[in-house]
Image (tube, grey):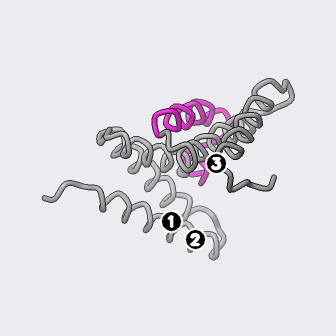
Amino acid sequence: MEWSTDEPASVAACQQQLEAVSHDSQSTPLDRFTAYDQYGLVLMKYARDAKKASEEFSKAIALAPERLNSIDAEWAYVHWHRATAERELGNSAEAETDFGVSENSLREAEKTIGNEKIAAYYHELVNRIVAQHAAHQPNS
């Protein structure tokens, strides 16, 4: 799928994709997980709707246990995405929890992946999560 830089078109395309996957009896929980996560990302980026994005990320997280576990990178990503939305909404406690889940998940994925390049990538993502999280902490 080629992404449009046109905001309404991007949001509408992802919404249509989510609806199609949701109504497809052949879709898997992972298909739906991915569609919810992608729709949430587009809502954050183009519609600037952190509340709706957080709801979509929460729907993805609710599906995740069916196909993912806490050391899967996708588990970390969706928690990172929701942390970003929750932080934007001013929900510090929820953001704190999701940043922690994301960081811990990627650290575990980094240890268990068995591929040096992917492990290095995960390590860099952990550093980005930590930096993003720290940038929004109240001064001690």
Question: Which three-letter amino acid code belongs to the residue tagged 1?
Answer: Leu
- Nearer-the-camera pick, 47 or 121: 47
Could you tell which of marks 3 and 1 lies nearer the N-terminus?
Answer: 3
Say which quadrant the C terminus sits in.
bottom left
**Mark 1–mark 2 contact, CB under 8 Å?**
yes
Name the residue that disc number 2 marks.
121
Residue at 76% across, 34% down: 16
Corner quadrant of residue 29: top right
Q: Secondary structure at mark 2?
A: helix
Single out the mark in the foreground, 3 or 2: 3
Question: Which three-letter amino acid code belongs to the residue tagged 2?
Answer: Tyr
Query: For mark 3, does the 10 Å Cα neighbourhood hold few (<14), some (14 to 19), or many (20 or more) residues?
Result: some
Q: Which residues are magenta?
A: 50-75
Q: Position of residue 128 (x, y in %)?
A: 44, 66
Residue at 66% across, 41% down: 11
Residue 59 is inside the magenta segment:
yes
Label disc, if present, on residue 140 of the rendered structure: none
Q: Position of residue 17 (x, y in %)?
A: 77, 37
Could you tell which of marks 3 and 2 lies nearer the N-terminus?
Answer: 3
Residue at 38% across, 61% down: 132
Query: For mark 1, does the 10 Å Cα neighbourhood hold few (<14), some (14 to 19), or many (20 or more) residues?
Result: some
Above or below, 119 against 104 in this view is below
Q: Secondary structure at mark 3?
A: helix
Q: For the image shown, how many numbered marks are present on the structure? A: 3
Name the residue that disc number 3 marks.
7
Q: Position of residue 109 (x, y in %)?
A: 56, 59
Name the residue that disc number 1 marks.
125
Residue at 36% across, 39% down: 89
Q: Secondary structure at mark 1?
A: helix
